[in-house]
Amino acid sequence: MSLKSRLSSFRRVYLAARTVDTPPTLLFWWGSYGYRGGPTIGDLMAVDNLSSRLRLRGVEHAVISHPELQIPGHLPVDDLYAIKPAKKLVFVCGPITYSRDLNDLLSVHRLATKIAAGVSVLPNHARMNRRFHHIVGRDGVDPPYFDLAVSETVEPTGKERLETAGVCLRGPQGEYGARRVAMAPQALAMFQDVVRGSTLHPIEIDTVLSPENGPGKIHAGFARSDIVLTTRMHGALLALAAGKPVIAIDQVPGGAKVSAVVGRTGWPFVFQAEKVSAETVRAALDELRAGNWRAHLVGAQARIRALVEDALAASVDAIAD
């Protein structure tokens, strides 16, 4: 860390005036940092689902979001380091990874009970993992729970022909470290090969929130798709929730959250990039085009709803207790 960064962290943690009053329990997510935090629609759905359950439990709390996101029901705070120390701090969704912003935030609330809910736990970020007193993880922990994003599902109907393919790609995932560099180019090449050899009309679905890409636009992309091709965990879960068949490729060598989380739904078309070929992906597409996927999808949706319920209950218990 540069001298400039160290001085900035020192000012945030020790010198900043704490002037913002909040409830005793605070929910943070990547949207707390605004668009620069790279928040996704899945992150937003997860934190809102958890907030709803906490309200039902009678737990006074606030979801902290940057004002530029303009999210109804959230507490807009421009300067996170001006918040008075909380009693409980909850980090929701996403992987626990080192960032100076998150590290400084945890240090500001050093006396708070720190909980992570609906998160991925990465072994190469063990130091950050140890900053939390309790983790309700979706992968990388034992026992694993599930992601918190999906609370409702749409009964699959589907066209007789699969014509429009929503393509939802993650891109490189450097957070897994140099030894597990994501195989994003290989996964992209396989999907491109499959689309080129078919009559599918591809449309891009970007799950990262931005001023031009709000929740309505993202959900509309899934609704327009007849099938979804994705390297994103939430890309797969939101497709299944929308009643759409999906082909998911986990691009992290050895498998990560796509394999671990989406795999627990029982949906059969989840592959690992280093073990799958374009021929296998094409065969999966042919099988889906044959139309024998609705029973699988209904079963996957039922498992998603049950798994989310368990994960939300465990998260609320950890916070309320």
Image (cartoon, rainbow, N blue to C red):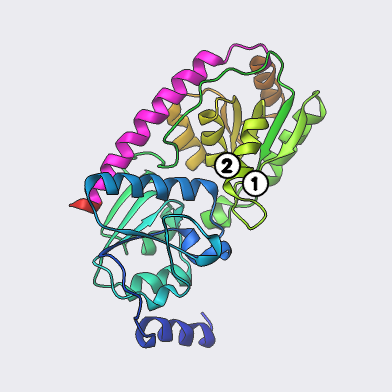
Residue 294 placed where, x, y %? 54, 15
Residue 88 appears in the rendering: no
Majority secondary structure in the magenta region:
helix
Q: Residue at x 31, y 52 (%)?
A: 135
Residue 97 appears in the rendering: yes
Q: Is residue 144 shown above or below 61?
A: above
From the viewer's side, name the closer residue of 63 and 192.
63
Q: Is residue 102 shown above or below 20?
A: above
Q: Amino acid at mark 2?
A: Arg
Pair 1/2: label in front: 1
Image mark for residue 79: none
Q: Residue at x 25, y 59 (%)?
A: 133
Q: Which residues are magenta?
A: 289-318
Residue 313 placed where, x, y %? 27, 40
Q: Disc 1 designates what residue?
A: 206
Q: Does the magenta run of residues contain 60? A: no
* Label 1 to label 2: alpha-carbon separation: 10 Å
- How many other residues sit within 10 Å of disc 1, few (<14), some (14-19) or many (≥20)? many
Q: Amino acid at mark 1?
A: Asp
Residue 259 placed where, x, y %? 50, 36
Q: Disc 2 designates what residue?
A: 232
Which secondary structure, mark 2? Answer: loop
From the viewer's side, name the closer residue of 255 and 80.
80
